[in-house]
Image (spheres, coloured by chain):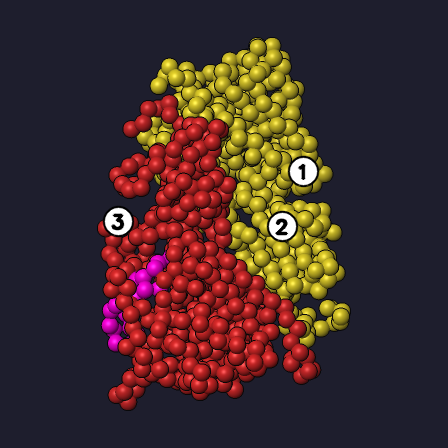
Chain colours: A yellow, B red
Amino acid sequence: LLAPELCNYTECLSTMVGTFPLLSVQPTRGLVDEKIQVVVRNLPPALSVTLHSLHHSEDKDLWEAFGHYTSDGQGTVTVAKDASLGGTYEGAEPMGLLWSMQPVPGSRTGLRLRKMDVLSPMVVHISVYSGHMTEGFSKQSPLATVVTERWYMAPDVCRIDIREHGVRGTLFLPPGPGPFPGVLDMWGGGGGLVEYRSCLLASHGFVSMALEYLPHDKNRTSDIESKTYFEKAFRIVQEHPLVIKDRVALFGLSLGASVALNLAAYSKDISPKCCVCISGSHVIPVNKAIGEVFRKMNKDGYKTRFDEEGRVVWRDIILPIPTDLGEKVDMGRIKCPLMLVVGEDDQNWATVESAKDMTQMMRAAGNEHLLTILQYPDAGHLIEPPYTPHFRASNFIMQQTRQKVIMLWGGYTKPHADAQEDCWEKILSFLRQHLYPSPDSVPKAKL
Amino acid sequence: MRAALTASPMLLLHPSRGLIDEKFSLIVQNLSRIQDITLHALIHSDDGDYWEAFGHYVSDATGFVNVANDSSLGGTYDGVEPMGLLWSMRPVPGSRIGLRLRKKEVHTPMVVHISVYRGHMSQGFREQVALASVVTERWYMAPGVRRIDITEGGVTGTLFLPPGPGPFPALLDLWGGGGGLVEYRSALLSSHGFVSLALEYMTPRTSGGSTSHVGNEYFEAAFTVLKQHPQVCGDSIAILGLSFGTSVALGMAVYSTVIQPRCLVCVSGSHVQPVKGSLSDVFGEINKNVRNTRYDEENRVIWRDLLLPIPTDPTKKVDVGQLKCPVLMIVGEDDQNWPATESAEDMKEMMEKAGNSHLLTTLSYPGAGHLIEPPYSPHIRASNFMVAGTKQKLVVLWGGETAPHGHAQEDSWKKILSFLEEHLYRSTDVTSQSNL
């Protein structure tokens, strides 16, 4: 066999033996949390190849991942089973071509990959190249390419803009007659209206509202300076004709998780059936308006650190965890099942210490049986739906000052990806368990 | 409006967007234990008709139904049939007669609504509220496949190109007597890595005041379009023909000096035609025997006898003993439209005498009819048919029974892809090596 690097590989091979590599990806169109099977067949045996993924983001950046493989005795590479010998991921990683994606060389710095338009899919080109390449993919012709679509939205999920009573959000309805359980979904201090997680939850059978509570548009004033904004938002979900009134959950990440804990403990108006809190803390000004959070953080701003690359580390701001009960959510007041998800390398909030303290508080109060903690070594702050690329740091605009910094989120790519995959399955299971009970378990007396 | 405490069952269908030939998994959970339910599928076709299928199930002790393992106790299909909700579809009661479900617009998916109903229902689905429903999309075109109109060289067709740089093996895709430009099979083949040209050839051409069928040079031109395409490997072109398309494929493969296919796939067709004849000649032969047309008890046209008996005169059939490439013959044993079984038997005899029968593989399916389509397409035993050119409307009997026909489509498609892969993607061709 001629050394492939010495000639135009495809031409040589197809002229000599009528052989073309066969690259396939299944499913061709999947939900973002569905696994893909990438297989290359029809290669010569023991051939070095590179599997490469490429995505052109909404922000017009290029993201890529790649793995180095050797074809087996039948000339096949099966990404789910074979070990990548190097690249942006190694070992047998069925989804490595997605979660290990990073901006291509020469990109702008501090990028984060997020899908803002959920009505269209993420399009990923998967190619197989001859040899073990680490760069120059755009200058080389691949042996074969296939295209796969990754969707946050299952067919017939309905997207509805919500602008009601001053509340701003987006509601997603699953297909079907319902009724369905509901979720109020809150992101973090980065603000804006982030829809994709809610969309994905609706694709799994939950009515979910993504809530905007920190608008990027400073001209838009809203009455978010109190719990009432969130209570109104919760009621919008609860009162939707397709929602089962007593099966509405709170779902929050980062600041959103703190909001969820605050509401679950103190709201007289709303009663979540269960809560999912990712990368959040109970150490916030207790029972006060959300604006207080920022004022307190500014006060403690002197505790901000910077790493060796000048990136902002905020994890110490809430440390040490106060012993004064007036300075944290009284976890003994939580009456519903609570799932906490925590990355041990979170550099943004001291979530590990918070989780430990929350456990102690609940143990002392006698409601620890409601608590489930998922804690992941070497995972960072931004624990997103599975296969979302990990970034240890990214550009961040400070909410109040609009100053641009690079925020260190923490985490290392492979453990962070594993955490995202593992906790999403457990989150869905938790939500189903508490929001979709089996009909045979509904007490007969209520029928 | 339901009581607020009732939780809906959950329908889990995966993948939610699939290719037409991909299987899906369908699970219902959160039902009551040992509950009677009906799973129902509904399509609103491009033509505005509704097609449906349904199966009766009973949930197990944990409130689960899994279509892959559980048996349908009745409906439009029974037994353990993971894809029964698709291949057993039929027009809803009250529909127009003689319908056929075909996707004209390949850029959009077939949208299927899958619902679960309480009890074992056989009608009245529209009036009843389902317990839950989901939607799945079924696509002929994978992402990245490109569709191109072809009008060059006097040829009318649609070319489908897979994503990637190529070069690729290619297919000339020929449908049958219904005519028109039928794209969906080519779109699907392209989704599997072949350049595929769906060719329009059955509509008679008018030139100089007279109407006639296309001549053999038309097919040669089409083959050349493929051969000269920059992304096609000229040595790796096959012909896939159904019905009349088989006549063209066999005739061209044996007698044309321009068309040298790497292999042939012939579905529901025959080698009976005047030697070196054209399409017009095939029609001529068929018309000679038009008195052999039969009708079934519902007055539907049976055309299978028009080419029977298989002639012994060698000038009346393609000399398949001269075939130099592998041929996959696919035959439905209940084909009421063409004598496909008899033709396949005769071809085998001819090739055994000539010593090239090792090139022939025949797949014969009991209970399958004439229209052996890509998998999970609904089976129709008869449908409206307009004779190309004369515009005469009939109801033609294709044959086949639903379950065996469904299985034939699934099995034959897998084998077609495998056969094409083996001969176009992998084969070491002795002829081309000698050219080096």
Instruction: Report in which chain the residue with disc 3 lies.
Output: B
Neighbour tally class for label 1: few under 14, some 14-19, many 20 plus, Cα within 10 Å: some
> Which quarter of the figure has residue A394?
top right
Marks 2/3: CA–CA distance: 48 Å
Q: In this view of the protein, which residue sits in the foreground, A324 or A205?
A: A205
Q: In this view of the protein, which residue sits in the foreground, B262 or A68?
A: B262
Q: Is residue A11 left or right of residue B189?
A: right
Residue farthest toward the bottom in the current orientation of the protein: B208
Does label 1 lie on the same chain as label 3? no
Residue at the spot of label 1: A415
Residue B385 is one of the magenta-drawn residues: yes
Instruction: Report in which chain the residue with disc 2 lies.
Output: A
Residue at 56%, 31% (x, y): give it: A426
Label annotation for residue B93: 3
> Measured from the top left, where is residue B397 in percent x and y?
32, 64
Query: The residue under label 2 is which amino acid type?
Result: Leu
Label annotation for residue A97: 2
> Measured from the top left, where is residue B411 in percent x and y?
50, 58
